[in-house]
Image (spheres, grey):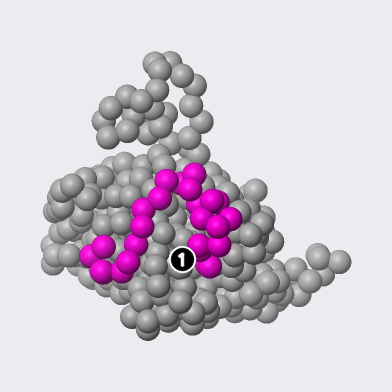
Amino acid sequence: MRAIEWTGEKVRFLDQTRLPLEELVVTTDDELVIIDAIKRLAIRGAPLIGIAAAYALVLAVQRVKHPTELLPTVERTATLLIATRPTAVNLSWAVQRMKRKALMLLHHPLSEVRSALLAEAIAIHEEDERMCEAIGQHGAAILPLAATVLTHCNTGALATGGNGTALALIRTAWEQRTLKHVYIDETRPLLQGARLTAWEVQRMSIPCTLITDATAAFLMQRGIVNAVVVGADRITRYGDVANKIGTYGLAVSAHHHQVPFIVAAPTTTIDPNLERGSQIPIEERSSDEVTYCGGTRIAPEDIHVYAPAFDITPHELITAIVTERGVASPPFSVSIPCMIGETEGVHRVEEGAG
Ligand code: MRU
């Protein structure tokens, strides 16, 4: 099944916290179940949490009995959704898009609002699926021949409405026979690489090797890897990238060893309102995610923990940013505004740059 689906009346999703040991499918008509699933990473990955948020708003509006309850319900649910995870901009992008739709139809019959919101959520889901396909095609074209790629976290079908972002690129290159091997970072602390990417890549029968995060720089030093490909949770208009903690370290190593560092994401991950990575809010997770592994405590009681879920890779360390619209190259302060159709942004950045 897809990571999330609309069944006709309810939402069905795979609880990713249980993978790869168990494929637990949850079916719900309660938006609070979706909100909780996003918080605990049962539903995760920047594009997927946007899609899930859109469906959560559909569920909330399904239970509205009187037109006067519509706006308060949308506002309340939108606030709860946006508070779940602050870094990935796809979430607030999808919530705002759904809110705009609801506001446009405020004085229409409730049945009409419900079907329009459902159509909008399905459109967000299907558009993401198509974006993944295009990212795969554009990205595969810039990989070196006989590519041995290193990837981080999970950016596949479990994280998106389609085949993924960085993982779609890897999959397309494999289908085009330009990919030789994939190294998968385990991605501490929640092991999205070991649990989810390894599961997905194995199911695609792509030759792969799981490594600890600490092994990545050594692989690059040995010349084993000739491209690093990652996803993103938010990209600023200057090309700074927030992604899973550990991405920045990979970019520094890749730069040092002259290995291309490629970021793949849909344009819905670009935040045109932000210029610098330091403006991106970084989510901090519970200390338990570091002090426990697989339910077993691995650190002394009362140890102080710092657990940012994401880090910022500055644009200088990035070779290319692949979206569904093509490949942006440095200087990103010019290519990104162009890519999202903001020519006035280009002037503004150029003026500021001097
Ligand atoms: O905390 P997660 O698992 O939601 O983090 C996911 C990532 O960092 C991904 O790399 C990013 O969302 C891109 S998914 C296509």
> Does the image show residue 48?
no
Q: Position of residue 35 (x, y in %)?
A: 30, 46
Corner quadrant of residue 103: bottom left
Q: Residue at 81% of width from left, 65% of height from top?
A: 353
In the depicted view, which residue is nearer to us: 341 or 321? 321
Which residue of the protein is positioned furthest toward the right in this rendering? Answer: 354
Quadrant holding the N terminus:
bottom left
Say if 241 sits above or below 72 in the image.
below
The residue type indicated by label 1 comes to Val
Secondary structure of the residue carrying numbered label 1: strand
Which residue of the protein is positioned furthest toward the front in this rendering? Answer: 222
- List the residue tagged with mark 1: 149
Say if 338 sits above or below 236 in the image.
below
Q: Position of residue 235 (x, y in %)?
A: 56, 61
Q: Residue at 32% of width from left, 33% of height from top?
A: 293
Corner quadrant of residue 122: bottom left
Q: Position of residue 6 (x, y in %)?
A: 19, 65
Quadrant holding the C terminus:
bottom right
| 252 relative to 42 in the view: left or right | right
| 282 relative to 206 in the view: left or right | right
Q: Which residues are magenta?
A: 202-227
Q: Position of residue 283 (x, y in %)?
A: 48, 42
Residue 200 highlighted magenta (yes or no)? no
Residue 206 highlighted magenta (yes or no)? yes
Q: Residue at 26% of width from left, 62% of height from top?
A: 202
Q: Assess disc 1: are there few (<14), some (14-19) or many (≥20) residues with their C-alpha within 10 Å of its C-alpha.
A: many
Q: Residue at 13% of width from left, 67% of height from top?
A: 8
Q: CB of residue at label 1: within 8 Å of ligand 1?
A: no
In the depicted view, which residue is nearer to us: 221 or 203? 221
